[in-house]
Image: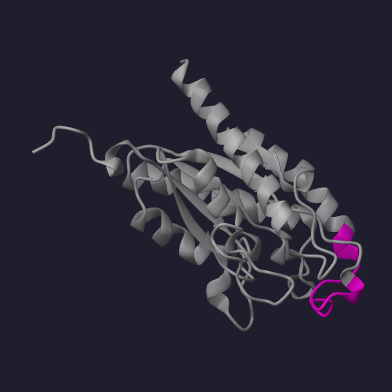
C-alpha cells in the first residue's frame, strides 16, 4: 500500500456560494453554460489539482430575503448544510446581493450589505464549531446592474433605481470585509452584465472573473505560507 497522501487530504476545498452568475446562467438562452465556460470551471483549471472547486450557485438566491414563491432561495437556508456537507472547507467565495435588489424586497444597499454580513458571521461561527477552523472568506461585491435593465427580460423585477443601488454595494461590502478580516473583491472591476439582459455574464466575463479569483486565492496562500 502506498504511503502517499490521498488527493482529498492535500487538496483545498473552495466553496463557491452564489446565485445565477455562480450557477452559470446563460443570458442568450436561459440555460446553463458548460463547465468549461462557467467561472467556477475555469477557476478549477487555473488553480489545478491542489484545489477542489465546489459549485453552489442557485438562480435567484438572495442573501437573507425570502422569495415569496421559493423561500428556499434564501441564502441563509442552504449555507450551513453546504458548509457541513463539504467540510473541511478551506476557502469560501461568497458572491450574493444582486437578487436582493429586486423590487419585491424593498431593500436598500445598506440592507443588502447587512445580509452579506449575516452570512459572513454564519460562515465564521459555524465552521469554527463544526470543523475547528475558519476558512478564508472572499467576500465579493456583485457586478452592477446594466444600464439597459428597463428593457431586460427581468424588467418586472428590477427597476431603474437598482442601477445606482448596485453601484453603492462595493463600498459597503468592503467595510464588511474589513470588519471581519475577509478578503474583498469587487466583481464589477472584472465582469459586466450582458447587454442581453443587464444581469448575467457573457463567457468573456466568466473568464475575467475566474482569473481574478485565481490570482486572489494564490496570493493569499503565498502570504499564508510566508508566515
Residue 36: percent from left, percent from top = 56, 57
Q: Is residue 135 left or right of residue 155?
A: left
Q: Is residue 87 left or right of residue 21?
A: left
Any magenta on residue 59?
Answer: no
Residue 215 location, quadrant: top right
Q: Is residue 152 left or right of residue 98?
A: right
Q: Is residue 118 visible?
A: no
State the residue at coordinates (50%, 60%).
Answer: 56
Any magenta on residue 162?
Answer: yes
Q: Is residue 14 visible?
A: yes
Q: Is residue 177 left or right of residue 7?
A: right
* Magenta span main SS: loop
Image quarter of the N terminus: top left
State the residue at coordinates (79%, 59%).
Answer: 193
User: Relative to the observer, which residue lies in front, 73 or 68?
Assistant: 73
User: Relative to the observer, which residue lies in front, 3 or 67?
Assistant: 3
Magenta highlight range: 150-163
Q: Residue furthest bottom?
A: 69
Q: Tell me if residue 214 comes above or below residue 110 in the rendering.
A: above
Amino acid at each position: 500500500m502506498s504511503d502517499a497522501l490521498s488527493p482529498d487530504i492535500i487538496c483545498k476545498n473552495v466553496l463557491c456560494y452564489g446565485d445565477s452568475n455562480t450557477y452559470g446562467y446563460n443570458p442568450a438562452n436561459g440555460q446553463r453554460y458548460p463547465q468549461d465556460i462557467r467561472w467556477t470551471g475555469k477557476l478549477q483549471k487555473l488553480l489545478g489539482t491542489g484545489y477542489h472547486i465546489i459549485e453552489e450557485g442557485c438562480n435567484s438566491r438572495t442573501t437573507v430575503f425570502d422569495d415569496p414563491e421559493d423561500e428556499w432561495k434564501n441564502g441563509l437556508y442552504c449555507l450551513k448544510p453546504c458548509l457541513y456537507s463539504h467540510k473541511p472547507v478551506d476557502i469560501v467565495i461568497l458572491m450574493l446581493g444582486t437578487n436582493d435588489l429586486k423590487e419585491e424586497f424593498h431593500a436598500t444597499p445598506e440592507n443588502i450589505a447587512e445580509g452579506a454580513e449575516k452570512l459572513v458571521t454564519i460562515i465564521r461561527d459555524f465552521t469554527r464549531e463544526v470543523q475547528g477552523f475558519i476558512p478564508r472568506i472572499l467576500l465579493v461585491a456583485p457586478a452592477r446592474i446594466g444600464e439597459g435593465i428597463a428593457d431586460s427580460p427581468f424588467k418586472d423585477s428590477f427597476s431603474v433605481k437598482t442601477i445606482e443601488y448596485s453601484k453603492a454595494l462595493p463600498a459597503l461590502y468592503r467595510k464588511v470585509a474589513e470588519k471581519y478580516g475577509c478578503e474583498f473583491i469587487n466583481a464589477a472591476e472584472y465582469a459586466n452584465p450582458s447587454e442581453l439582459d443587464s444581469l448575467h455574464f457573457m463567457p468573456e466575463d466568466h473568464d475575467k472573473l475566474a482569473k481574478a479569483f485565481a490570482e486572489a486565492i494564490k496570493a493569499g496562500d503565498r502570504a499564508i505560507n510566508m508566515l
